[in-house]
Image (spheres, rainbow, N blue to C red):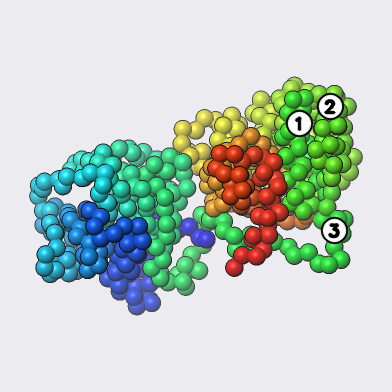
Amino acid sequence: MKIFTTDEIREIDKYTIEVDGVSAIDLIEKVGEGVVAEVTSRWLPSKPVVIFAGPGNNGADALSAGRILFEKGFRPQIFLFNIGGDRLSKECRVCRDRIASLPGIDFTEVTNTFSLPDLMNSHLVIDGLFGSGLRDQLTGGFTSLVQYINESRATVISIDVPSGMFGDWNKDSIHRNVIHADITLAIQFPRPAFFLRENAELVGDWKILDIGLSQKAIATIMPTYYMIESHDVKRKLKRRHRFVSKNDLGSAAIIAGSYGMMGAAIFANKAAIRGGVGKVTAVSPRCGFNILQTAVPEAMFQADKHEIVISNIVLKNDFSAVAIGPGLGTHELTITAIDDFLASRNRPVIIDADALNCIAKRPTMLNNLPVMSIITPHAGEFDRLFGQCSTDYERLKKAIEVSHQYNIFIILKSHYTAIIRPDGKIYFNSSGTPAMATPGAGDCLTGLIASFLAQGYLPEIAAIMGVFIHGRAGEIAEERQGLYSVTASDICDCIGPAINSIVESE
């Protein structure tokens, strides 16, 4: 799915109105109907509802929803803020007049001061004060109103974006001056800001309201941001012909493990095998031989000359893909081995976990990263490599710069894992679950990406497929084990069902 910036959505909206001939008021009515459908699916007409509408088209959306709710038997209390008496958009005036004509509706147009309604946690608040077109942070009376709504503990549905939040980036926003929504109903597309950790408390759960914006305009604009969905992966997944052999499916080397951390090597190798690669070789210290040959008998084993750490990386075969990092530790011998290996490698490598920590201890290795390599840091690993970041926004911006500088792909792991391309395009993953916050889950991802890279997928596609299928496997594992009990082994075991679910999806 394409994810558009606020300006791009404004272009699509304009095209829909001017070229497709859909009136702005018709689009607003569709938003109102979508909001009402969400409300009526959750609550009965006895639910006390308070609607706050601003002077622009976001306010018009809220007024439309209020009118339809009233017609369906709800009794909403509606406030339209028209401070000064002449600030309404054309569409907002139309919606106001429609509301005002309904006998018995509780409607107040606020042009100066007003008395706050008594909000309680039993109330539903529909927030239509300001949408993604907001240009400046809220001030004055609106900040007081927002803070009052947040403190009331009422359930809040925000239309488009929570009022006070910007759709793209929120670098300097003050959270107490932004609506904290329980549900955000995004119009046609999610906004880039929805995918960042620091905005989670503002956005709540988000859903998309499809209002029928121009498909031609949507197809024409090529955005910076995308969201990976099942059909994207299904389209790229290669089908196996009946005469396929393991020699057709590539070979992967997984350089992983050290004394006391062989579990990471097990998970990475298992995931690579579950991903469908033809052959896997575990490259580990000698102490890992019995462990890996027992836990992952399908994998071959290449022993390092050292007993307990990786000390020298000389691969005995020309592998289709190489992944390095899980459970390696950061021994000085290992750091030097990685340094020498990267300096001699001229094909992409998947670099994760302790390999990233080793590079952080010797940053000159960054200059030897093979072009189109894939690094897979979580926030802590990224910050150790490239400097401390206080927000996901800062981290993502820095990742764009780093990806371009070194010509590599960065998989920035989070709830919405982001895949950053060297050209600045970003893919947010839509699969996964908090159940995957478990030791070894990242090692599974490393092996899975190596599996797809070995099978001949381009690094970008291997990253996209690996991240999505890994997340889907976590979802299936949660279904089987519950939110609190998923292990890395469960995720590995669910890779096959995850791939099948994608193949069989609509």
Three-letter amino acid code of the residue under disc 1: Met
Query: Cα distance, mark 2 to mark 3?
Result: 32 Å
Q: Position of residue 223 (x, y in %)?
A: 50, 59
Residue shown at 64% from the left, 50% from the top: 473
Three-letter amino acid code of the residue under disc 2: Cys
**Among all residues in the image, which is located at the extreme top?**
332
Q: Position of residue 422 (x, y in %)?
A: 61, 48
Residue shown at 81% from the left, 67% from the top: 241
Q: Of label 3 and label 1, which has the lower sequence position?
A: 3
Residue shown at 33% from the left, 44% from the top: 180
Residue 201 drawn above or below residue 106: above
Determine which quarter of the picture holds residue 311: top right
Q: Position of residue 196 (x, y in %)?
A: 46, 44
Provide the residue designation for mark 1.
262
Query: Cα distance, mark 2 to mark 1?
Result: 9 Å
Q: Of label 2 and label 1, which has the lower sequence position?
A: 1
Residue 275 drawn above or below residue 22: above
Residue shown at 23% from the left, 44% from the top: 120
Crowd tier of the residue under label 2, counting other residues whose Cα lies within 10 Å: few below 14, some 14–19, many 20 or above = some
Which one is in front, 117 or 246?
A: 117
Count how many numbered circles sit on residues in the image.
Answer: 3
**Which type of secondary structure does the marked residue at label 1 adopt?**
helix
- Left or right of 487 in this view: 171: left
Provide the residue designation for mark 2.
287
Q: Are marks 2 and 1 in contact (CB under 8 Å)?
A: yes
Provide the residue designation for mark 3.
248
Crowd tier of the residue under label 1, counting other residues whose Cα lies within 10 Å: few below 14, some 14–19, many 20 or above = many
**Which type of secondary structure does the marked residue at label 2 adopt?**
helix
Q: Quadrant of the C terminus?
A: bottom right
